[in-house]
Amino acid sequence: MVMFRRFRRASGDAGAALVSVIGAMLVVGVVVTTLVATSIANVRVTTESRSSSEARAVAEAGIAQVQAMLGAKSCPTGGVVNGTVGGGSFAVEIHPSDTAAASAADAVGCPTATTASVFLSAKGTAAQTSVGGGPASRTMQALLARKVASSPLFGAAIYSGQNMDVNTNLALTGTDADIFTDGNFRCSTAASIQGSVLATGKVTFSSTPCTVEGDVYSDEFECSNASVIKGGLYARGKANFSTQWCTFSEDVWIGGDVAAARGIKTAGELKVRGNPPVNNATSELPLASNVTVGGKIGNGVGASNYNLMLAKYPLMQQYAAVDMPPKAIDVKPTTMPKVDQSHSIFTGWTKKSWKASVEPLRSSNIPACDLNWGGNHFSGTLKVTSPTIFDTTTATECNNGMLKLGAGLKLELSADMVIFAKSFDIAGDVTITSGDGLQHSLYFITPYPASQTSCTSNVDSARTITYTTGTWNQSSKVALLVYATGGLRFHMSPGPQIYGQMYSCKVEMNTAVKLHFTQAGATDDSASKAQMSVTYLRDAG
């Protein structure tokens, strides 16, 4: 009996132990299964993460490659670039836009000369796929903005540091094609100016009528012909309309007295800080929305005439508070910047010898610095493919720094170029073209002397640029800045057609000149195209 009880107890203990063992094995099994499953999942996640990272790197490499291609002015037909990197592959779509905010909505294609930005969509595919064949591709997007060099030094179409006389027909065209002079401005011919005229001195329209599409800012103003100003007049001094009508499309604002024997024609308001004389109450003042006078209307004319004027112009006021018109320099701050060979504009440019570059191109033995010959004496073209400096003022170049251009000289620009000389004389045929069909800048510069403090003090009158004779052939793809600290003179007949800007301490126009305002230094060249910069880079999944 005792043995039986022991046997039953022993048998019961063994059963309990077995249950414990089985339970433990189940727990271990669950743990192992979990660990295995977790490990497999981790492997999958790690592999997918690695694969995804690789796909992203491949897509970014594709964007970098396309950026370099566009910088080198290369683009495949259709605007899609395919390539491989480390076993992975990419496909990059190019979406160019003439705005600064290209997007996927813009058509796929290649940039043009007017393209301002490019949207890139790059799909990268990794060489390694994830466990179970999961996705191994990634799409990256980038916006490239064309880096356009700006030139705040040169904002006007024409700048003259002293008085400026336009003695022959001037045709000045282009958006904001403004003339600024730190002196008087006289237009005595049928000039056509698409911008504004801003002078710190007196502006005079005499002889043949002139046309100004913009405004006129001056100290004093005189109109002795039937000139047309399609903007307004802002004269801080007195204004004289004593011999002819001048027609204005906008406000006339005068800071001094007015002489107006022939009246004032304006479609805008008339504001006179001083006294406007009225000799004929029915024709002297405009049919304007407002006539405001700081002094006395009629300058002593009797009350009956004043009442007639008031009946015609019910909004007329006299003895009113009239402020001074704005100054030209405040409207468009413009000066003659001091530019020489050390200026930051030309940092990083390559210096080359003018004589060594020009002499091999000649077909006759004419001096490289004295090309004042008629006809064609060149068998080759001077080609510029990177931003280049020619300094002819050194002893080994043009000795006295006097450079004469002509003889059929041909300049072909695929990058910007500057020539420094103590003076320029265009005395023969010159042709200037763009080598790649893109916009480039050309500078003719007489360096600003250290001894010269302004355009009216210690001016070296020998530092001039003169158009004397010959034929000037310039492509519209090249913006020319003529910069002369002494003077800029035009005697060439027929006069030249220039695309660019003119800056000089004194501008003299004695023959007809056509200037289409194109800002030098603010156009794209091969160097600036290579600097197409990334505005953003983002992961599109």
Image (cartoon, rainbow, N blue to C red):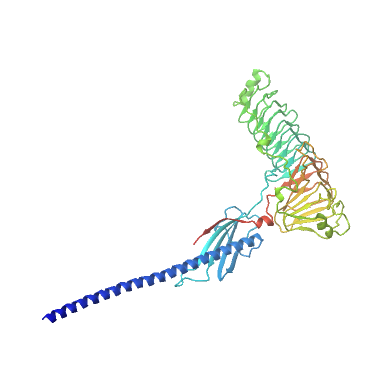
Examine the rendering and report whether any part of residue 181 can be seen. Answer: yes
Image position of 343 (left or right of 494): left
Examine the rendering and report whether any part of residue 287 can be seen. Answer: no
Image position of 269 (left or right of 357): left
Residue lying farthest to the right in this orientation: 365
Counting from the top left corner in percent of width and height, residue 248 is at 68, 35
How many labels, in total? Answer: 0
- Between 269 and 463, which is closer to the camera in this rendering? 463
Task: Give above or below for 34 relative to 241.
Answer: below
Counting from the top left corner in percent of width and height, residue 225 is at 75, 33
Q: Which image quadrant for residue 435?
A: bottom right
Image position of 39 (left or right of 352): left
Task: Give above or below for 123 relative to 463.
Answer: below
Residue lying farthest to the left in this orientation: 1
- Between 511 and 500, which is closer to the camera in this rendering? 500
The residue shown at (71%, 31%) is 219
The residue shown at (69%, 26%) is 256
The N terminus: image quadrant: bottom left
The residue shown at (80%, 59%) is 381
- Between 176 and 448, which is closer to the camera in this rendering? 448
Counting from the top left corner in percent of width and height, residue 266 is at 66, 33
Image position of 55 (left or right of 313): left
Counting from the top left corner in percent of width and height, residue 367 is at 87, 54
Q: Which image quadrant for residue 530?
A: bottom right
Task: Give above or below for 265 relative to 417.
Answer: above
Task: Give above or below for 373 relative to 509.
Answer: below
